Image (cartoon, grey):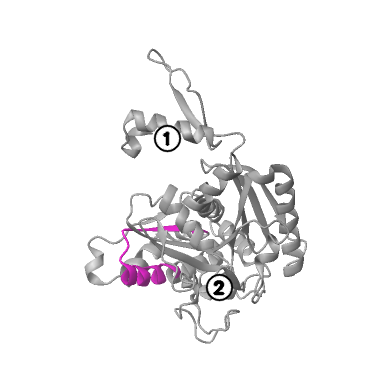
Amino acid sequence: MARELHLTSGLATEITARMRELRLLTETPAPIRGRGRPTTVLQPHPEGPVILAADLRQEDWRHAIVTVDGQLHNLRRQAHRSREPATVLTAVRQTVAQARTQYGDRLRAVSLAVAGTVHDQHLAQASTLGWGRVDLSTITIDTSLPLLVGNDATLAGVAEARTGAATTASTALHLIVEVGIGGTLTVDGSPVTGAHGAAGEYGHLPLGDRRLHCPCGARGCWDLDVDGRALARHLGEPAPADPRSYARHILDRAADDTRARQAVTAVAQALATGIAGLANMHDPDLITLGGLGPAIRHTARAAFEGAYTDGLMAFHRAQPPPVVNAAHGDDGPLHGAAIIGLDHTTSAPALADWAIANR
């Protein structure tokens, strides 16, 4: 730790002693690996602060307890009994109440990733859930806990930049294909969120068919060309109720079904063309691709690579920004929610509050 933080051994010893006193960290004997002086490893204190991280998706929601080392514990998934906002938020609120009962004052915040547009820490619209503006503050209203809210794709990008496939990139673009496509641009690990936190709605760029109306209210959104809804149109099938599961089914069929493979190829080209446009716009060091994106790319790799190269400005083609698979996979939004929760919990004001509570 001292080497990583460029501390003297004496200062590192002093800091860890204070953190033990505050019940933030504990030291335990390190595993023995041959001869040498016995040493210790730092771990979260068993009575230390935790946060509840949750990921609210179209079909279900997941939640986990996060300790100060960023590890997820007791990860659980719950399918929506109904997509009505009141029903979904009641289920989340009950889980928050249970966590507060179990952890007491150790629970310091609730951090929520949501598949929707976040504007000034409020859910402005979640078209994949069929929601308009929804007040999420009721989730923690009975607990007075801080509620941190972020778009799922934005938080997945934070996770890739901090602990995933983009840790070496100063400027990274993350894209996630689920129901539509979203993402974020991160600079030195922080997302570019715009004036109100709503930046990164890449799926609503007018890169698609202008004849198509998007549930967001706009025409020709890129969303409609890159997910299960696009696959269904190419196959002449009705729009699926669950575009994500439908897309997975078509991707599985594509190995042996020519029509399915052709549909995936068309979607891969639309996806890669848009990514090239974003590369031209943002000039990232690296592009990470999550959700269904890696499977779409893998199934129609030649079409994807060709469309990506064709869409790049000429000067980018000599050294195009690499497109790599996201390291966190489907867990990206949950890990991102954990990270912003830890950012809050380890801020100077939050640590001061914790110190007062533990005197």
Which of these two is toward me, 296 or 342? 342
In percent of width and height, residue 182 lies at 50, 67
In the image, is residue 227 above or below residue 221?
A: above
Q: Residues within 10 Å of mark 2 (few under 14, many from 20)?
A: many
Horizontal placement of 105 versus 68: left or right? right
Q: Residues within 10 Å of mark 1 (few under 14, many from 20)?
A: few
Residues drawn in magenta: 271-291
Q: CA distance from mark 1 to mark 2?
A: 55 Å
Residue tagged by mark 1? 15
Q: Callout 2, which amino acid?
A: Ala
* Residue marked by disc 2: 230
Answer with mark 1 or mark 2, whichever residue precedes in sequence: 1
Drawn side of residue 310 relative to residue 146, left or right: left
Which residue is drawn at the image coordinates 45% and 61% (left, top)? 300
Q: Which quadrant of the figure contains the N terminus?
A: top left
Quarter of the image for residue 239 reads: bottom right
* Rendered residue at 28%/62% (across/down): 320
Task: Give the quadrant of the C terminus.
Answer: top right
- x, y (%) of residue 244? 61, 63
Q: Does residue 145 appear left or right of residue 342 in this picture?
A: right
344 or 290, which is in the foreground?
Answer: 344
Q: Residue 324, can we see it?
A: yes
Relative vertical location of residue 337 with respect to residue 242 in this rendering, above or below: above
Task: Choose top left, top right, bottom left or bottom right for residue 212.
Answer: bottom right
Q: Position of residue 154 (x, y in %)?
A: 49, 62
Q: Is residue 275 magenta?
A: yes
Q: Can residue 218 be found in the magenta stretch?
A: no
Question: Label 1 amino acid?
Answer: Ile
